Structure formats: C-alpha cells, structure tokens
Amino acid sequence: MLPDKSKLVIALSLFLIGFFHFSMNDSSALQQKISIYLNGEEETDWEPQFLNGRVYIPVRLMESLGSKVSWDATKQTVTINADIKMIASIPEEDVYLYALNKENNFYKDLVVSSKGVKKVYEWKTIEKITDLPQLYYVDLNNDQKKELVIVLSEGHGTGFSVQNIHIVNPENFTEYSIENPLDIVKKHVATKIISDSEVEIKIDGKVSSLNLKNSSFPERISEISFENIINYQIFENKIMAIVGVEGAYLQHIGYLKIEYHFKDGTYKMKNISFSQN
C-alpha cells in the first residue's frame, strides 16, 4: 500500500513514460470534456489539464498510474490499467520504489517515492526476489544532505552478475551521473597473457604478475574479460564498484575495486586497485 500523501500531478507523455503521444492544436477540442477510465471504471472527480500539447492527469497516491495508458483522440478518453508493485523501501526515511510494468522477467518503469513526492524513471530490474533492488539513503557528496542510491540487477546467473546504479537527489529528483566502471577499466587497465597460466594486470603503470597454475583452471588462459561481474557496494558513505576479472567462462582471476568520489557535479573514479581475493 502506498503512503497516504496528497495528490500528485503526473505528466503522462511519450518522453517520460512512453505510453502515448498526441498534440491538441484545435482550440475547440481543448474545451471538450476529457474522460478518464481507471481499470474500466470512469473517474469523474479528476480534471485533466493540457499543457504544451500533453495531457496532465492528477494521480492520487500513484495508485492510479498503471501499466498501460492509452489516449483516444476521437472519444477524448484516457484509459489507465493499473498494476503497481512495491519492490523496495526504506520506511524509516519514507522512501519507496515501485514498478509500473513487468515484462520478460523484468520490472520496468520504476517509480521513486521520497517523502510523498514521486517520479517515474525508465529503469528496469530483474523481478526475482533474490535480485530485488537495494536502496541506500546516505550523504555521498559531503553536502550534509542525503542522496538516494538505487542499485538494480541487469542479470544474475552462474558466473554472471551485473548491476547498475542510480543516484538521485531526493529534493528535486534529478539524477547524478556516475562514470561507467567498464569505461574506467578501458582507460586505466591493461592486460597481457604471458603463458597458458601466467597473466599480467597493469593499472596506471603498476604491474601485478600472476601465476595461475594452481588455480584449478580447466583450460589455458586465452582471453581476459571484465563484463560478467559488475556489482556495487555502499560503505562508509562511499560508492565502490567491484568488477570481476576472468580468463574465460568461470575462470576467475580476481577483482578490480573502483572507489568513487564526487567531483565537478558527477561521481568519478577516485582510485582503482586489483585483488585476487
């Protein structure tokens, strides 16, 4: 059940949610009555508004915003089929995360609610209960105000675990950018295969030479990849990305640890290191 807060006007547009897109250039059409149907029932106490060619609908507590929204220009009708699900929360901070849609084992079109104010983001995350989103409400940039961190799962299986991260200012719902860990690896890490069981990891000129002969690898090392393990941790108000270093499928070599800091309005790499454990 959603928190009991006041009405919120949500813009239902192609840009924001991708449900529908239309323009109203005919001034006489703007004066016609717009009907709203929620789950097949007409809602008579709502008054849609037009602004810059978009329909704005007052949505009570987000319970009425749903998985499918359609606009019938001929009948002047907005139809909403609602199916909201809460998938993560920090109740003590009045922070909640909802999913509007579910498709192919993913929750899509996620709603962030903070102190009763809500916004829809075009994010997705795996629906499995073992991979539900992780929420953190911490001061990451030392401005004495807390940021909302949302860690979502893109995929999880044997030898594969990939997450993505979103950092939101809960005061205005703007999203901070964060440097992609794979871009960081590309800039700062070089690898070299010395022999069937020897590899070299070089980070900004610092070399780690590894002999993997006793690591029970089923095959020789023929490649080094970083794409299969990307996880995030929040520790002592800092963001850490953990990137797996692999020789091939299930050939674990070690981990790259990337620590971030806030600089020039974005979260960038502060340092990067390699560990076999």
Image: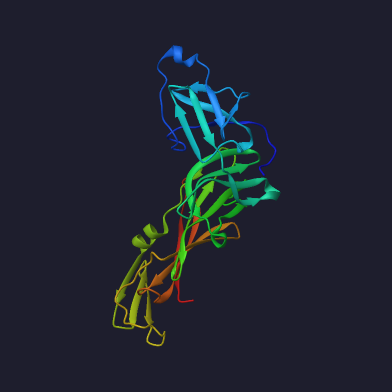
Q: In this view, does 275 lie to the left or right of 10?
A: left
Colour basis: rainbow
Outermost residue to the top? 28
Which residue sits at x=62%, y=42%? Answer: 114
Vertical arrangement, residue 180 with respect to residue 49, above or below? below
Vertical arrangement, residue 252 with respect to residue 172, above or below? below
Q: Is residue 127 visible?
A: yes
Q: How many marks?
A: 0
Q: Give how far across and how far down residue 237 sits, in percent.
A: 59, 56
Q: Is residue 205 left or right of residue 6?
A: left
Q: Give how far across and how far down residue 181 sits, in percent.
A: 42, 59
Quadrant housing the N terminus: top right
Q: Give how far across and how far down residue 84 sits, in percent.
A: 58, 44
Q: Give how far across and how far down residue 271 sits, in percent.
A: 46, 62
Which residue sits at x=52%, y=40%? Answer: 120
Q: In this view, does 277 lie to the left or right of 116?
A: left
Vertical arrangement, residue 158 with respect to residue 5, above or below? below
Outermost residue to the bottom? 214
Q: Can residue 173 be seen in this view?
A: no
